[in-house]
Amino acid sequence: MGMINFAGLALPVTPLLLAAAFIVSLFVGKRLATTQHKEIDSALFTTLITGVLAARLAFVIRFWATYKLTPLSIIDIRDGGFYPWIGVVAGCCVAVWYVWRNSSLRRALLIALLTGACTAGLSGAAVWALRPTPSDIRLPAGIFTALNGNTMRIDAFLGKPVVINLWASWCPPCRREMPMLQQAQADNGDVVFIFANQGEAADTVHQYLSAERVNIHNVILDADMKVAKHAGSMAFPTTLFFDSRGRLQNIRMGELSAASLAQRLETLHLDHKD
């Protein structure tokens, strides 16, 4: 479900929903099972952890070619690399096993699990309904100044998939993901990568790129942060993924990993072929 922007912070929606569902399940379970709190805790915690691990493992297996280059990144779940439905299936299997195995806790467990599932489902539906529809956001219009002094229109790239990275040199996550994005730009010639620096002077951007030996193309200076306002995200880094028809298909607030970038580029490649 992605991220939400709150007071300049990028907060992951899915972990927040899972935490709320777990707390509600735990509360209901303990209220119903007055003498077997440890068993309820163990069942609910195991169900949650199994689902999360299965969702992560499935994603890691799918993008193993990327993760094997940096194995420690497997445990860095901040990249948002999960297959939620696989986690749901795994969690349901564990939940069914606990419900079947513990006859004395069956009623309490079943009600607790269903209450948690309803909490997550209803909260997720509310967030989904209130969020801006990505496909309603189009490639930003207007004329921007490129780092080389020329002018550039982002919507001139209509007809190709476009990835816009919103960044600043003072932003540590922006700096960390820059080499990976540089490589992605070099490897994906059919996708247009645009690096929209937010609010910094040309000299500052030049100094950073030179000092870090970053060689990227299509760098624009967005002094008024028009692109960030257009996308509704003032948290950096933010990366926007537009299909070849100029419609926003995905937005990532926060640092990308090579695997999470590959997942989103794969979707853009498939859309472009269609």
Image (tube, rainbow, N blue to C red):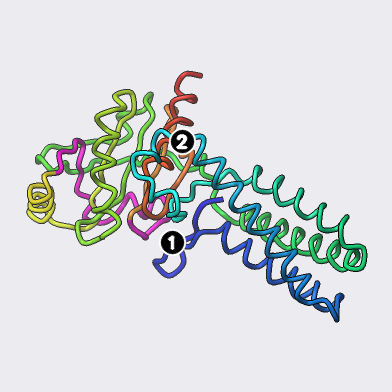
Count of residue discs: 2
Looking at the image, residue 163 sits to the left or right of residue 44; the answer is left
Looking at the image, residue 234 sits to the left or right of residue 14; the answer is left
Q: Earlier in the sequence, mark 2 or mark 1?
A: 1
Q: Is residue 151 located in the magenta-colored stretch of the structure?
A: no
72 in relation to 246, above or below: below
- Could you tell me residue 33's position as x and y percent? 86, 75
Question: Label 1: few (<14), some or many (≥20) within 10 Å?
Answer: many
Mark 1 lies on residue: 10
User: On the image, which quarter does residue 234 sit in?
Assistant: bottom left
What residue is rendered at 9% in x and 49% in y? 206
- Could you tell me residue 252's position as x and y percent? 43, 49
What residue is rendered at 36% in x and 28% in y? 158
Amino acid type indicated by mark 1:
Ala
In the image, 177 versus 121, the foreground residue is 177
Q: Which mark is residue 63?
A: 2
Q: Nearer the viewer, mark 2 or mark 1?
A: 2
63 in relation to 108, above or below: above
In the image, 196 versus 74, the foreground residue is 74
Amino acid type indicated by mark 2:
Phe
User: On the image, which quarter does residue 19 sit in?
Assistant: bottom right
Q: Which residues are magenta?
A: 214-236
Looking at the image, residue 270 sits to the left or right of residue 53; the answer is left
SS at mark 2 in the image: loop
- Could you tell me residue 41's position as x and y percent? 73, 71
In the image, 49 versus 86, the foreground residue is 49
